[in-house]
Image (cartoon, grey):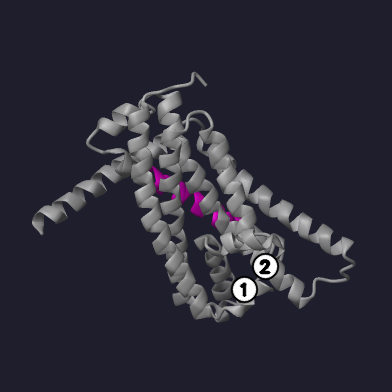
Amino acid sequence: MAVTLSGFRGSLRRARTAAWLGWQVEGNWADPVLFAIYVLARPLATALILAAMYSAVRAHAGGAGPGAGAAAAFTGFFVANAFHSYVNQVLVGMGWAVFDEREQYETLKYVYASPVGMFTYLAGRSLVKYALATVSVLATLLVGWFLLGVRWDWAQVQWLPLLAATAAGLASTLFLGFLLAGWSLVLARAAMVALEGVSLASYLLCGVIFPIDFLPVPVRWLAMGLPFTWWYEALRRFLTGHGTVGMMQRFADREVLLWLGVTTVVFAVLARWGYFAFERQARRLGRLDQTTLF
Protein backbone atom coordinates (compact mmCIF):
# COMPACT_ATOMS: atom_id res chain seq x y z
CA MET A 1 0.00 0.00 0.00
CA ALA A 2 2.80 2.39 0.91
CA VAL A 3 4.65 1.51 -2.31
CA THR A 4 1.51 2.15 -4.37
CA LEU A 5 0.88 5.49 -2.69
CA SER A 6 4.50 6.52 -3.15
CA GLY A 7 4.34 5.59 -6.84
CA PHE A 8 1.14 7.60 -7.26
CA ARG A 9 2.71 10.65 -5.64
CA GLY A 10 5.73 10.27 -7.90
CA SER A 11 3.48 10.17 -10.95
CA LEU A 12 1.75 13.34 -9.77
CA ARG A 13 5.07 15.11 -9.34
CA ARG A 14 6.18 14.08 -12.82
CA ALA A 15 2.87 15.17 -14.31
CA ARG A 16 3.15 18.53 -12.53
CA THR A 17 6.65 18.99 -13.95
CA ALA A 18 5.36 18.15 -17.42
CA ALA A 19 2.51 20.64 -16.98
CA TRP A 20 4.97 23.37 -15.96
CA LEU A 21 7.08 22.62 -19.02
CA GLY A 22 3.98 22.63 -21.19
CA TRP A 23 3.03 26.07 -19.90
CA GLN A 24 6.49 27.38 -20.73
CA VAL A 25 6.19 26.01 -24.25
CA GLU A 26 2.67 27.40 -24.70
CA GLY A 27 3.05 30.82 -23.16
CA ASN A 28 6.63 32.05 -23.17
CA TRP A 29 6.70 33.18 -26.81
CA ALA A 30 4.58 36.33 -26.31
CA ASP A 31 3.64 38.93 -23.73
CA PRO A 32 0.47 38.21 -21.71
CA VAL A 33 -1.80 40.51 -23.74
CA LEU A 34 -0.81 39.03 -27.09
CA PHE A 35 -1.06 35.51 -25.68
CA ALA A 36 -4.57 36.21 -24.32
CA ILE A 37 -5.65 37.47 -27.75
CA TYR A 38 -4.23 34.32 -29.32
CA VAL A 39 -6.09 32.06 -26.89
CA LEU A 40 -9.43 33.87 -27.20
CA ALA A 41 -9.47 34.77 -30.90
CA ARG A 42 -10.43 31.38 -32.32
CA PRO A 43 -13.32 30.45 -29.98
CA LEU A 44 -14.81 33.93 -30.04
CA ALA A 45 -14.56 34.13 -33.83
CA THR A 46 -16.18 30.70 -34.12
CA ALA A 47 -19.02 31.75 -31.82
CA LEU A 48 -19.71 34.91 -33.84
CA ILE A 49 -19.55 33.00 -37.12
CA LEU A 50 -22.01 30.45 -35.75
CA ALA A 51 -24.40 33.23 -34.72
CA ALA A 52 -24.13 34.85 -38.17
CA MET A 53 -24.68 31.52 -39.95
CA TYR A 54 -27.71 30.72 -37.83
CA SER A 55 -29.25 34.15 -38.46
CA ALA A 56 -28.59 33.89 -42.20
CA VAL A 57 -30.16 30.42 -42.44
CA ARG A 58 -33.23 31.52 -40.52
CA ALA A 59 -33.62 34.61 -42.68
CA HIS A 60 -33.29 32.52 -45.85
CA ALA A 61 -35.88 30.09 -44.48
CA GLY A 62 -38.29 32.96 -43.89
CA GLY A 63 -38.12 33.11 -40.09
CA ALA A 64 -39.87 36.23 -38.90
CA GLY A 65 -38.65 36.27 -35.31
CA PRO A 66 -36.49 34.36 -32.91
CA GLY A 67 -39.29 32.21 -31.49
CA ALA A 68 -38.96 30.09 -28.36
CA GLY A 69 -38.11 26.90 -30.28
CA ALA A 70 -35.54 28.55 -32.51
CA ALA A 71 -33.93 30.36 -29.58
CA ALA A 72 -33.71 27.11 -27.61
CA ALA A 73 -32.15 25.30 -30.58
CA PHE A 74 -29.55 28.02 -31.07
CA THR A 75 -28.74 28.02 -27.34
CA GLY A 76 -28.16 24.28 -27.45
CA PHE A 77 -25.89 24.47 -30.47
CA PHE A 78 -24.03 27.45 -29.03
CA VAL A 79 -23.35 25.66 -25.73
CA ALA A 80 -22.10 22.55 -27.55
CA ASN A 81 -19.89 24.72 -29.74
CA ALA A 82 -18.42 26.38 -26.64
CA PHE A 83 -17.56 23.09 -24.92
CA HIS A 84 -16.12 21.70 -28.15
CA SER A 85 -13.12 23.90 -27.38
CA TYR A 86 -11.97 21.13 -25.05
CA VAL A 87 -11.95 18.68 -27.95
CA ASN A 88 -10.11 21.11 -30.21
CA GLN A 89 -7.49 22.02 -27.64
CA VAL A 90 -6.80 18.60 -26.13
CA LEU A 91 -7.06 16.35 -29.18
CA VAL A 92 -4.94 18.53 -31.41
CA GLY A 93 -2.71 19.73 -28.57
CA MET A 94 -1.62 16.32 -27.31
CA GLY A 95 -0.77 15.11 -30.79
CA TRP A 96 0.93 18.40 -31.57
CA ALA A 97 3.09 17.99 -28.46
CA VAL A 98 4.47 14.80 -30.01
CA PHE A 99 5.05 16.57 -33.30
CA ASP A 100 6.79 19.51 -31.61
CA GLU A 101 9.06 17.37 -29.49
CA ARG A 102 10.11 15.24 -32.44
CA GLU A 103 10.29 17.78 -35.29
CA GLN A 104 10.97 21.19 -33.76
CA TYR A 105 12.91 20.49 -30.57
CA GLU A 106 14.18 16.99 -31.47
CA THR A 107 13.83 15.89 -27.85
CA LEU A 108 11.15 13.21 -28.14
CA LYS A 109 13.57 10.32 -27.64
CA TYR A 110 14.94 11.97 -24.49
CA VAL A 111 11.43 12.46 -23.07
CA TYR A 112 10.65 8.84 -23.86
CA ALA A 113 13.79 7.62 -22.08
CA SER A 114 13.46 9.97 -19.10
CA PRO A 115 11.98 8.97 -15.71
CA VAL A 116 8.88 11.01 -16.57
CA GLY A 117 7.97 8.77 -19.51
CA MET A 118 5.83 9.65 -22.51
CA PHE A 119 2.47 8.72 -20.98
CA THR A 120 2.92 10.85 -17.87
CA TYR A 121 4.49 13.63 -19.93
CA LEU A 122 1.47 13.77 -22.24
CA ALA A 123 -0.88 13.73 -19.23
CA GLY A 124 0.95 16.75 -17.80
CA ARG A 125 0.88 18.58 -21.12
CA SER A 126 -2.85 17.95 -21.37
CA LEU A 127 -3.42 19.90 -18.12
CA VAL A 128 -2.27 23.08 -19.82
CA LYS A 129 -4.57 22.37 -22.76
CA TYR A 130 -7.49 21.89 -20.38
CA ALA A 131 -6.72 25.21 -18.68
CA LEU A 132 -6.58 27.07 -22.00
CA ALA A 133 -9.78 25.37 -23.18
CA THR A 134 -11.55 26.36 -19.95
CA VAL A 135 -10.70 30.00 -20.61
CA SER A 136 -12.07 29.64 -24.14
CA VAL A 137 -15.29 28.01 -22.94
CA LEU A 138 -15.95 30.68 -20.31
CA ALA A 139 -15.20 33.50 -22.74
CA THR A 140 -17.49 32.03 -25.38
CA LEU A 141 -20.36 31.56 -22.94
CA LEU A 142 -19.94 35.11 -21.62
CA VAL A 143 -20.01 36.54 -25.14
CA GLY A 144 -23.08 34.47 -25.90
CA TRP A 145 -24.84 35.58 -22.73
CA PHE A 146 -24.11 39.30 -22.93
CA LEU A 147 -23.85 39.94 -26.68
CA LEU A 148 -25.87 37.26 -28.46
CA GLY A 149 -28.73 36.68 -26.05
CA VAL A 150 -27.86 33.04 -25.34
CA ARG A 151 -29.76 32.56 -22.09
CA TRP A 152 -31.07 29.73 -19.92
CA ASP A 153 -32.88 29.52 -16.62
CA TRP A 154 -30.35 28.90 -13.86
CA ALA A 155 -33.11 27.61 -11.59
CA GLN A 156 -33.72 24.75 -14.04
CA VAL A 157 -30.09 23.63 -14.23
CA GLN A 158 -29.63 20.02 -13.05
CA TRP A 159 -26.29 20.41 -11.36
CA LEU A 160 -25.47 16.85 -10.33
CA PRO A 161 -26.14 15.24 -13.75
CA LEU A 162 -24.42 18.20 -15.39
CA LEU A 163 -21.26 17.72 -13.33
CA ALA A 164 -21.29 13.97 -13.97
CA ALA A 165 -21.71 14.49 -17.70
CA THR A 166 -18.96 17.11 -17.80
CA ALA A 167 -16.54 14.82 -15.96
CA ALA A 168 -17.28 11.98 -18.38
CA GLY A 169 -16.92 14.27 -21.39
CA LEU A 170 -13.59 15.66 -20.24
CA ALA A 171 -12.35 12.14 -19.52
CA SER A 172 -13.38 11.02 -23.01
CA THR A 173 -11.48 13.94 -24.47
CA LEU A 174 -8.35 12.91 -22.58
CA PHE A 175 -8.66 9.28 -23.66
CA LEU A 176 -9.04 10.17 -27.34
CA GLY A 177 -6.17 12.63 -26.94
CA PHE A 178 -3.90 9.80 -25.79
CA LEU A 179 -5.00 7.65 -28.72
CA LEU A 180 -4.23 10.42 -31.22
CA ALA A 181 -0.92 11.15 -29.52
CA GLY A 182 0.01 7.50 -29.93
CA TRP A 183 -1.04 7.65 -33.56
CA SER A 184 1.15 10.74 -33.98
CA LEU A 185 4.12 8.73 -32.72
CA VAL A 186 3.71 6.45 -35.74
CA LEU A 187 2.87 9.13 -38.27
CA ALA A 188 5.45 11.57 -39.55
CA ARG A 189 4.48 14.87 -41.16
CA ALA A 190 0.96 13.56 -41.87
CA ALA A 191 0.20 13.87 -38.15
CA MET A 192 -0.78 17.52 -38.60
CA VAL A 193 -3.43 16.73 -41.19
CA ALA A 194 -4.70 13.72 -39.24
CA LEU A 195 -5.13 15.67 -36.01
CA GLU A 196 -7.01 18.53 -37.61
CA GLY A 197 -9.10 16.05 -39.57
CA VAL A 198 -10.20 14.16 -36.46
CA SER A 199 -11.06 17.40 -34.69
CA LEU A 200 -13.13 18.57 -37.65
CA ALA A 201 -14.81 15.17 -37.97
CA SER A 202 -15.86 15.26 -34.33
CA TYR A 203 -17.28 18.75 -34.91
CA LEU A 204 -19.45 17.49 -37.76
CA LEU A 205 -20.35 14.05 -36.41
CA CYS A 206 -21.29 14.75 -32.82
CA GLY A 207 -24.17 17.17 -33.21
CA VAL A 208 -22.32 20.36 -32.36
CA ILE A 209 -24.02 22.60 -34.92
CA PHE A 210 -26.79 20.41 -36.37
CA PRO A 211 -28.74 17.33 -35.24
CA ILE A 212 -27.22 13.98 -36.14
CA ASP A 213 -30.49 13.18 -37.97
CA PHE A 214 -29.03 14.99 -41.00
CA LEU A 215 -26.17 12.49 -41.26
CA PRO A 216 -26.40 9.41 -43.50
CA VAL A 217 -27.68 6.40 -41.57
CA PRO A 218 -24.31 4.52 -41.28
CA VAL A 219 -22.55 7.72 -40.20
CA ARG A 220 -25.36 8.42 -37.76
CA TRP A 221 -24.73 5.12 -36.00
CA LEU A 222 -21.03 5.95 -35.86
CA ALA A 223 -21.91 9.29 -34.26
CA MET A 224 -24.02 7.55 -31.62
CA GLY A 225 -21.03 5.40 -30.72
CA LEU A 226 -18.96 8.47 -29.83
CA PRO A 227 -19.12 9.79 -26.26
CA PHE A 228 -19.03 13.41 -27.43
CA THR A 229 -22.46 13.05 -29.06
CA TRP A 230 -23.95 12.04 -25.72
CA TRP A 231 -21.91 14.65 -23.85
CA TYR A 232 -23.24 17.53 -25.93
CA GLU A 233 -26.78 16.19 -25.61
CA ALA A 234 -26.34 15.98 -21.83
CA LEU A 235 -25.03 19.55 -21.70
CA ARG A 236 -28.07 20.81 -23.57
CA ARG A 237 -30.50 18.97 -21.34
CA PHE A 238 -28.95 19.57 -17.94
CA LEU A 239 -27.72 23.13 -18.52
CA THR A 240 -30.26 24.73 -20.87
CA GLY A 241 -33.19 22.40 -20.25
CA HIS A 242 -33.67 21.60 -23.95
CA GLY A 243 -32.40 18.54 -25.79
CA THR A 244 -31.83 18.21 -29.51
CA VAL A 245 -34.87 17.88 -31.75
CA GLY A 246 -34.97 14.55 -33.60
CA MET A 247 -33.88 11.04 -32.78
CA MET A 248 -32.10 12.05 -29.57
CA GLN A 249 -35.50 12.91 -28.11
CA ARG A 250 -36.21 9.18 -27.90
CA PHE A 251 -33.76 8.84 -25.03
CA ALA A 252 -34.62 9.78 -21.47
CA ASP A 253 -32.16 11.78 -19.39
CA ARG A 254 -30.93 8.73 -17.51
CA GLU A 255 -30.40 6.90 -20.80
CA VAL A 256 -28.28 9.77 -22.12
CA LEU A 257 -26.12 9.57 -19.00
CA LEU A 258 -25.96 5.79 -19.26
CA TRP A 259 -24.77 5.82 -22.88
CA LEU A 260 -22.31 8.58 -22.08
CA GLY A 261 -20.85 6.45 -19.32
CA VAL A 262 -20.74 3.29 -21.45
CA THR A 263 -19.05 4.98 -24.42
CA THR A 264 -16.59 6.71 -22.08
CA VAL A 265 -15.54 3.40 -20.51
CA VAL A 266 -15.18 1.79 -23.96
CA PHE A 267 -13.11 4.75 -25.12
CA ALA A 268 -10.89 4.48 -22.04
CA VAL A 269 -10.12 0.82 -22.70
CA LEU A 270 -9.57 1.25 -26.43
CA ALA A 271 -7.49 4.40 -26.00
CA ARG A 272 -5.13 2.89 -23.44
CA TRP A 273 -4.64 -0.24 -25.52
CA GLY A 274 -4.29 1.78 -28.72
CA TYR A 275 -1.78 4.23 -27.29
CA PHE A 276 0.66 1.57 -26.13
CA ALA A 277 0.16 -0.41 -29.35
CA PHE A 278 1.07 2.69 -31.37
CA GLU A 279 4.02 3.36 -29.05
CA ARG A 280 5.41 -0.13 -29.61
CA GLN A 281 4.92 0.28 -33.35
CA ALA A 282 6.77 3.61 -33.29
CA ARG A 283 9.69 1.95 -31.51
CA ARG A 284 9.83 -0.83 -34.10
CA LEU A 285 9.76 1.66 -36.96
CA GLY A 286 12.34 3.97 -35.37
CA ARG A 287 9.94 6.93 -35.35
CA LEU A 288 10.85 8.23 -31.90
CA ASP A 289 13.86 10.11 -33.25
CA GLN A 290 12.87 10.40 -36.91
CA THR A 291 12.53 13.93 -38.30
CA THR A 292 11.34 15.11 -41.70
CA LEU A 293 13.14 18.50 -41.65
CA PHE A 294 9.73 20.15 -41.70
- Is residue 130 magenta-colored? yes
Is residue 106 a member of the stretch shown in magenta?
no
What x and y, as percent, mark residue 240? 60, 73
Q: Position of residue 201 (x, y in %)?
A: 61, 50
Which residue is rendered at x = 52% and y = 60% of the image? 226
Residue 128 has which mark? none
Q: Residue at x 33, y 44 (%)?
A: 276
148 displayed left or right of 242: right
**Residue occupying the point 87% across, 69% down:** 63
Mark whose residue sits in front, 1 or 2: 1
Q: Are marks 1 and 2 in contact (CB under 8 Å)?
A: no
Question: Please, what is the dominant secondary structure of the magenta stretch?
Answer: helix
Q: Is residue 279 left or right of residue 142?
A: left
Which label belongs to residue 248?
A: 1
What residue span does the magenta drawing correspond to?
A: 125-140
Give the amino acid at mark 1.
Answer: Met
Nearer to the camera, 74 or 136: 74
Whole-percent x, y for residue 257 in the image: 48, 73
- Name, please, the residue furthest toward the left: 2
* Residue bearing mark 2: 75
Residue 242, can we see it?
A: no
Q: How many marks?
A: 2
